[in-house]
Image (cartoon, rainbow, N blue to C red):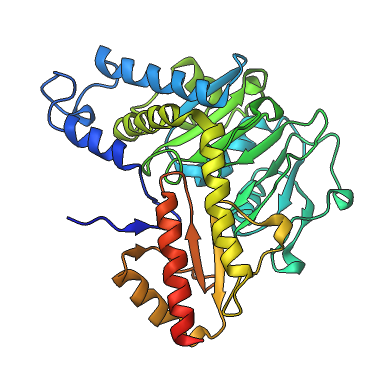
């Protein structure tokens, strides 16, 4: 069997050492005589898996003790509702920064639960940049400020942490978490769907400052209740045990690599190689303002979109998968998550250069 280089935006590539270890433990998990997905989530064996995964994640991110770490279900989309239900107190408004498709979806969901103030938007610029912070209209009495540090679809990324004063900062880090070091203490809540840099789809990571746990609306569903889930160690309901276990293996893999500082350097090189090639080509173009380019999701457009089909077909034949851009944007997109090796980027650049030479 020959594995391809997987540039999919999510569900995305998983590290091969993680897959190999899971394969070895699949039928008999550490002498239990069953797989990890068959055993009780409250049994001693799985509780050890869960505890180690949380501890390893806390080590990777240097999570302060005054933050709870939750392993939940519902994806980041579920958190679009969970955030206002847990953090909005009384008649408070909610501040949102609009930088693309996913922040837009978060805004639409939050509007069901109270007044939303659009602090700033890059919609008029085609979501190809980050709004100048000098133009933001923050509400000092807002329940929180929400932003999407990396827009997976548009390939736009914040390369700074917004300063929101005493108002809690909330971040949808689905496509950027664990890609480099992160100062957790700058945030009130961090949430992320697992299927990009954490593990397989089905798990949602939430990191929440403990002093915010009692703000919740009385109507918040129990499954999304941060305080209730914290009290029950993310096991108020049956958690996604297989995804939790596999994510724990990813955390171990990252620690063995040298942690997030080492991973960040690898990711910086990967993105730099692809952007350097695109910028020095007359055949390919990246539509994002250079100061807002994503390390994780790199969209690029061919000079002639009539060649898109040929590009994708030949790329697949060369073992390069998942390069089709999102249907709302078109073109191509290479997602360079942690599990995508540097060799994959080298192979992609070589293919793009050859395709350009043959079709320019």
Q: Is residue 179 above or below residue 188?
A: below
Q: Which residue is pictured at 44% across the width and 59% down the height?
A: 346
Q: Which of the two residues, 14 or 144, is positioned nearer the viewer here?
A: 14
Task: Give the farthest residue toward the right.
Answer: 134
Relative to residue 343, is residue 169 drawn left or right? right
Figure quadrant of the N terminus: bottom left
Residue 202 image position (x, y, % from top left): 37, 41
Quarter of the view holding residue 120:
bottom right
Question: Tag count in the figure?
Answer: 0
Query: In this orientation, does residue 14 appear?
Result: yes
Whole-percent x and y of residue 125?
75, 68
Residue 297: quarter of image: bottom right
Say which residue appears at 54% left-offset and 70% top-offset: 328
Identity of the residue drawn at 10% across and 22% down: 33
Residue 307, percent from left and from top:
45, 84
Please identify the quarter of the rendering in which residue 45 is found: top left
**Residue 220 seen in the current view:** no
Q: Is residue 284 left or right of residue 314?
A: right
Q: Is residue 282 above or below residue 187?
A: below
In the depicted view, which residue is nearer to us: 265 or 299? 265
- Residue 282, horizontal then vertical, whole percent: 61, 79
């Amino acid at each position: 069997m020959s594995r391809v280089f997987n540039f999919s935006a999510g569900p995305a590539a998983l590290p091969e050492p993680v897959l190999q270890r899971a394969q070895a433990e699949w039928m008999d998990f550490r002498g239990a005589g069953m797989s990890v997905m068959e055993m009780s989530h409250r049994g001693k064996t799985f509780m050890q898996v869960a505890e180690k995964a949380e501890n390893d994640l806390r080590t990777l991110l240097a999570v302060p003790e005054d933050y709870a770490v939750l392993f939940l279900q519902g994806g980041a989309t579920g958190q679009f509702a969970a955030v206002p239900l847990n953090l909005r107190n009384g008649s408070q408004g909610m501040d949102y920064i609009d930088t693309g498709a996913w922040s837009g979806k978060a805004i639409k969901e939050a509007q069901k639960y109270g007044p939303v103030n659009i602090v700033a938007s890059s919609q008029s610029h085609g979501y190809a940049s980050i709004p100048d912070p000098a133009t933001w209209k923050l509400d000092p009495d807002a329940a929180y400020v929400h932003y999407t540090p990396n827009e997976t679809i548009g390939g736009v990324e914040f390369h700074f942490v917004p300063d929101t004063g005493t108002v809690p900062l909330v971040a949808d880090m689905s496509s950027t978490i664990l890609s480099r070091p992160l100062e957790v203490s700058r945030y009130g809540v961090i949430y992320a769907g697992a299927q990009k840099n954490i593990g397989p789809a089905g798990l949602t990571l939430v990191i929440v400052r403990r002093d915010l746990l009692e703000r919740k609306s009385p109507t918040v569903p129990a499954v999304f209740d941060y305080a209730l889930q914290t009290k029950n160690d993310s096991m108020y309901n049956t958690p996604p045990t297989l995804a939790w276990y596999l994510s724990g293996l990813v955390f171990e893999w990252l620690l063995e690599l040298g942690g997030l500082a080492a991973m960040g350097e690898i990711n910086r090189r990967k993105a730099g190689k692809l952007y350097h090639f695109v910028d020095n080509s007359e055949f390919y173009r990246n539509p994002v303002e250079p100061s807002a380019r994503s390390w994780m999701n790199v969209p690029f457009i061919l000079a002639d979109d009539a060649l898109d089909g040929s590009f994708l077909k030949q790329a697949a034949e060369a073992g390069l998968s998942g390069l089709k851009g999102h249907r709302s944007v078109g073109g191509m997109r290479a997602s360079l998550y942690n599990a995508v090796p540097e060799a994959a980027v080298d192979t992609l650049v070589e293919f793009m250069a050859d395709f350009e030479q043959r079709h320019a």
